[in-house]
Amino acid sequence: MCSSGSASGDVLDDVAALVAERNRTDAAPARRVRAAELSQAPERDGLTSMVSWLRGHCRLSPAEASRLVRNGRALEHLPVLAEAHDAGLVSAAQVAVAADVTTPARRAAAMAQGIDLGGIDAILTAVALEQEHAALVVVVARYCNALDPDGPEPDPSDGRRMSLVRHGDGSVGIHGHLDAVGGEKVQTALEAHVQADRPAGDERCRAQRLGDAMVQLADDALASGNLPVLRGVEPQVVVRVDAEDLATGEGSAELGSGTLVSAARARRLACDGTIARVVMGPGGVPLDVGRDRRLATRGIRRAAEVRDGGCVFTGCDAPTWWCDLHHLVHWIDGGETSLANSALLCERHHTKVHHGFRVERHPDGRWRTWRPDGTEIGVPAPLRPPPLVPAG
């Protein structure tokens, strides 16, 4: 009978063997892709590059097709690393990192400076075999920088790209790549929001906090009024919803992109937005477009910021510039747009309040929060130091 320790060891051995097998399997197509590229094989199918052939005939993503072609070229110029890849000791990802040293410009620079690429090949292979992935990235970057320390600074935009993919349910996938400095800027801005938005009991994972931080950056930019004006109109999130659905919170609403969201979510967005009445005729033709009506004046907003100082939800310390102005009694239900009927709530807690939670301001000025089941959310009373006892 095997012990749990030995069983775990067998599983880990299997994982290591499978990873090595995958590495060997990845090496073979990279070499064949390079052979096909050298023989101009894509011309047979009316294409000019192996990248386009791999995308069209093998249904690879652009990124994966490009990596496979670059890896094939790198293996040609780094035979020691290629041998380790064939043996399953080096991964395709490591080869992709090392490929940066084999570009035509860098090979020419190395030759002009009398640098033996064979020696670099041996060093990179040793690092790939003996150290973690990040160490190889650092070694490659240092080598590339040393080749042309005084050369022209590359345009940072050359190393940046981003795509937004809207899925069938309206959610958006973000895929991108930033240069080192640009990435540092974005990460620093996101991290500021991630670290500042950590209320007690927060169970969000790291990825969720980063996603919330990205949305908060967009909220701040939209609220600032400093974004470029497009055709005379400031950038804004547009929501179309029937008046009846907005009143009941039932039914659906449509974003400017055509994505459907719930009418309840539209009610939340309407708390601190601008409303324009549009009367529709037969066939969906607009007959009358009323003037925009701002629900909360700048004066009310400013007064709420001074009074509340940030999100009023118990236990939250989100600053005023993260907050929407929430109507305690929704304006469409007869609630007036006034300071007394307003509360500052951050995005997360604004959503909570529209889904059963309740905030209320008592005559003494304190805000209190109740859960959907009617129980109040409390915070621990501050610890008071013990009274001083005279000696003697």
Image: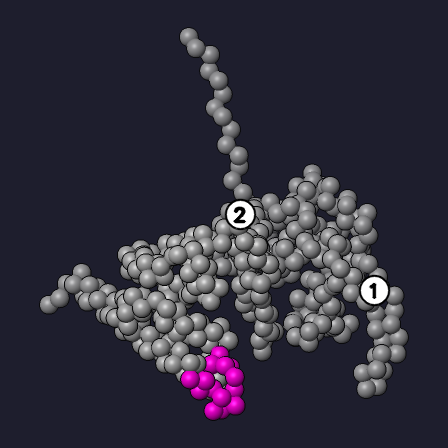
Identify whether 6 is placed above or below 298: below
Q: Is residue 34 left or right of residue 10?
A: right
**Res 237 visible:** yes
- Mark 2 belongs to which amino acid? Gln
What residue is shown at x 78% (from left), y 72% (from top)? 243
Q: Position of residue 352 (x, y in %)?
A: 60, 58
- Mark 1 belongs to which amino acid? Gly
Q: CA distance from mark 1 to mark 2?
A: 37 Å
Q: Position of residue 85 (x, y in %)?
A: 30, 69
Q: Position of residue 232 (x, y in %)?
A: 83, 64
Residue at the far top in the pictured view: 392
Question: Which residues are drawn in magenta?
Answer: 39-52
Q: Which residue, given by chain and number where applicable, does mark 1 sit on?
A: 232
The verdict on residue 45 being magenta is yes
Q: Which residue, given by chain and number where applicable, does mark 2 sit on?
A: 195
**In terms of depth relative to the viewer, which is nearer, 123 or 323?**
123
What residue is shown at x 46% (from left), y 15% (from top)? 389
Pointer 1: residues within 10 angstroms few (<14), some, or many (20+)? few
The verdict on residue 106 being magenta is no
Sequence-first disc among 1 and 2: 2
Identify whether 164 is placed above or below 127: below
